[in-house]
Amino acid sequence: MNYKKIDFKSNYFDLFELVEGIYAAISKNDSGASVSAGFFDLGNYLIVFDTHIYPGATHDLYKAIKELYDKDPSFIINSHYHSDHMFGNYLFPENIPIMSTPLTLEKIKEVCCDQLKHFRETADEEILKRKEMLKSEDAPFGEIEIYNDLEFYKYVKDPNFNIRLPDFLIKDEIIINGTKKTVHLIPYGVGHTESDIIAYFPNEKICFMGDLLFADLDESWAPNETGRFNAVNPSNLYKILKSIIEKDIEIYVPGHGELSKKDAVQMNIDFIKKYFIEQ
């Protein structure tokens, strides 16, 4: 399937039109943003899939929507509770509802609110560290990422910033038949997190996977003290991916990394089998 890169300027992501009305915001390697997001026009509904963590990335996502459609989204989907996918909720107008699973809402309350508290407590220290990095020739990451981190810590220090919770909860698959396109919002049980949602377009053969899929994995992600591959239940994630790979999908939008094909799903399956199941 052919897709095209849209002429949209962002320090955080490249914007791709996968087919007419379905867009993926794929993070730039040097931005530190890392998370992929997207939005899709069903005709009578305009839906956002995840909202980033860096405020600049969220602003750019909202700006892209307004430039292309000159209207607000109908609602937002939080694929799961991890802060890098949902801290940007707060920056969307309050009249735009947010949808997640009940377990995602529970985990946002339990985990993300504590994370915000920690970010605030350490913000001054982290800002000083980033400013020192800008003076150093051996900073652990690039200048763009450092500036993005500075923006983030300054933002979370603002007492007006807060975690915005989902408004509507779904437990089972929802099929939204728009006037132009149909999307299946499918919640899965414990895998990457306690609960994740995918957005599947059967007619267009496109699937927004959230963190059920990573575009790249290597030996450094194998089980170790860093816990980089942090699936809550690798065995169940293995089963989820085995079921998804059987669907007729040509483009997978992973939670992190480049736009992917079926071989990326198989790579995730093989990785989990090697390091988490065959032990």
Image: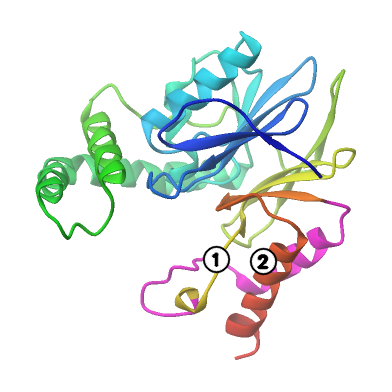
Residue 4 percent across, percent down from the top left:
69, 35
**Which element carries disc 2, helix, strand or loop?**
helix
Q: Is residue 236 magenta?
A: yes
Could you classify mark 2 by the number of other residues whose Cα lies within 10 Å: few (under 14), some (14-19), or many (20 or more)? many
User: Quadrant of residue 270 in the image?
Assistant: bottom right
Residue 142 appears in the picture as rendered: yes
Label 1: few (<14), some (14–19) or many (≥20) C-alpha neighbours in 10 Å: some
* Residue placed most toward the observer, 188 or 33: 33
Q: Amino acid at mark 1?
A: Ala
Q: Which residue is mark 1?
A: 231
Q: CA distance from mark 1 to mark 2?
A: 7 Å
Q: Among all residues in the image, which is located at the extreme top?
A: 70
Dot 1 falls on a residue whose secondary structure is loop
Can you say whether 5 is above or below 45 in the image?
below
Start and end of the magenta stretch? 222-249
Question: Residue drawn at (79%, 67%), measured in percent from left and top?
Answer: 242
Q: Is residue 256 left or right of residue 244?
A: left
Choose the circle earlier in sequence order: 1 or 2.
1
Let me know if residue 96 appears in the view.
no
Quarter placement of the C terminus: bottom right
Q: Position of residue 210 (x, y in %)?
A: 61, 48
**Residue 80 percent location from the top left of the image:** 57, 46
